């Protein structure tokens, strides 16, 4: 297992010098953020990013993410051009030593929350999803960090309507086309592609979401029979609902060699199905993080892992979910569990 840490590039207040001081973290997960979605990343920008990371003694072997353009998901407009651009990005990243690419196929919205700074009883602040609040939101006027903010209200309304008309089966059809186009390039380039589950793993605002549960993960993996076609299994995303047994999913897909990249974090599920993000420590949320880590260890997981979203603690001000302190605690906690498992059952 290689422990990594997400880094949002030179403008990230969490610097490479800070990350390199976290025990056991060997690399960062990053991306080129200056290029519009769907366009080809300049070779010099990729190399510049890698050189910055390597200069601090860290690796840049995972990219999160190469975004998938909405035209690809809808199967309209410049879909085929954007797919060709995606293939070229895979080739260019492979040329500088990238081994894994994380991406998602969530329509319109990426991760969705109702508040980014909900105070918790211990004084920390966390990302939360309260169903009652989400039900009152106008999806044409939402904005969260990392979302595409280039759409007007009318354009967003039209996009949402297009996805409603497309439906789940239409989205599956377009995902299958995308996968069958890019995967031969990924295999040839020896790059492992890991789709990130939908976050949260259910339909929002009437828009279909399909990477949500075991049945759909099985269907997704059946689209292309090669270990380079895999899942970036996120315990916090799939774990937002009690219907997903995360240790079971880890054991199943890790044993198949289909998890190149793992996000491990905890989440507290509330009585009405809402959830609050929590500290990684098992007792703070609804997930058994030790059982999750043991599932990875028992199946010989040798891919990349990172702590996922963190709370804001100790007065830190940073990108929501991506401060230094709580994620560093998470990385150390996960590494501590892994070291214990290694010593109790050396492989």
Image: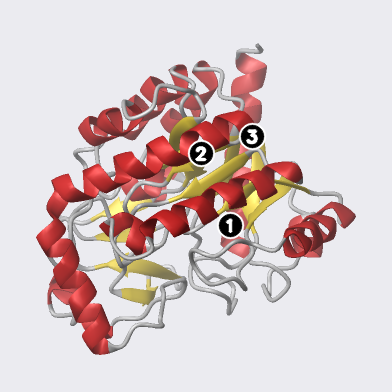
- Residue 97: horizontal and vertical position, in percent? 74, 41
Give me the disc on residue 243: none
Query: Whole-Å distance between the Cαs marked 2 and 3?
Result: 11 Å
Give percent across and percent down for residue 276: 32, 61
Residue underneath mark 1: 327
Number of residues whose C-alpha sits closer than 10 Å to that of mark 2, classed few (under 14), some (14–19) or many (20 or more): many
* 169 versus 19 height, above or below: above
Sequence order check, earlier mark of 1 and 3 = 3
Res. 25 in view: no
Q: Residue at x 61, y 15 (%)?
A: 344
Task: List the residue tagged with mark 2.
Answer: 193
Q: Closer to the camera, 47 or 321?
A: 47
Under circle 1, the secondary element is: helix
Mark 2 or 1, nearer chain start: 2
Badge 3: how crowded within 10 Å, few (<14), some, or many (20+)? some
Q: Is mark 2 on a helix, strand or loop?
A: strand
Apparent side of residue 12 relative to residue 232 in the rendered image (left or right): right
User: Which residue is at a point 42% across and 29% down the rendered structure image?
Assistant: 291
Numbered marks: total? 3
**What is the CA distance from the residue labelled 1 to the residue labelled 3?**
32 Å
**Does the rendering let one see residue 231?**
yes
Which numbered tag is attached to residue 189?
3
Quarter occupied by the N terminus: top right
Q: Nearer the viewer, mark 1 or mark 3?
A: 3
């Amino acid at each position: 297992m290689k422990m990594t840490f997400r880094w949002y590039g030179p403008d990230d207040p969490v610097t490479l010098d800070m990350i390199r001081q976290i025990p056991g973290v060997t690399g960062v997960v990053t991306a080129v953020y200056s290029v519009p979605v769907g366009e080809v990343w300049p070779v010099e920008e990729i190399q510049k990013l890698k050189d910055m990371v390597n200069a601090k003694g860290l690796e840049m072997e995972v990219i999160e993410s190469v975004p998938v353009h909405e035209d690809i998901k809808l199967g309209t407009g410049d879909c085929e051009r954007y797919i060709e651009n995606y293939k070229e990005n895979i080739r260019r990243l492979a040329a500088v030593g990238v081994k894994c690419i994380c991406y998602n196929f969530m329509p319109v919205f990426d991760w969705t929350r109702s508040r980014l700074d909900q105070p918790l009883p211990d004084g920390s602040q966390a990302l939360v999803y309260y169903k009652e609040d989400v039900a009152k939101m106008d999806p044409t006027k939402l904005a969260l960090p990392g979302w595409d903010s280039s759409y007007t209200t009318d354009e967003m309304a039209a996009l949402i309507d297009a996805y409603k008309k497309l439906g789940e089966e239409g989205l599956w059809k377009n995902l299958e086309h995308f996968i069958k186009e890019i995967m031969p390039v990924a295999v040839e380039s020896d790059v492992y592609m890991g789709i990130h589950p939908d976050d949260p793993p259910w339909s929002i605002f009437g828009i279909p979401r399909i990477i949500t549960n075991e049945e759909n993960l099985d269907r997704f993996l059946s689209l292309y029979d090669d270990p380079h076609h895999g899942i970036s299994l996120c315990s916090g995303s799939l774990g937002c609902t009690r219907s997903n047994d995360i240790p079971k999913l880890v054991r199943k897909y890790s044993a198949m060699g289909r998890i190149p990249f793992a996000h491990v974090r905890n989440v507290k599920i509330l009585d009405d199905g809402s959830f609050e993000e929590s500290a990684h420590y098992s007792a703070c949320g609804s997930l058994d993080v030790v059982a999750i880590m043991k599932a990875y260890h028992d199946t010989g997981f040798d891919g990349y892992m990172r702590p996922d979203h963190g709370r804001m603690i100790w007065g830190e001000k940073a990108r929501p979910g991506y401060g230094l302190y709580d994620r560093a605690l998470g990385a150390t906690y996960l590494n501590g569990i892994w070291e214990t498992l290694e010593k109790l059952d050396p492989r």
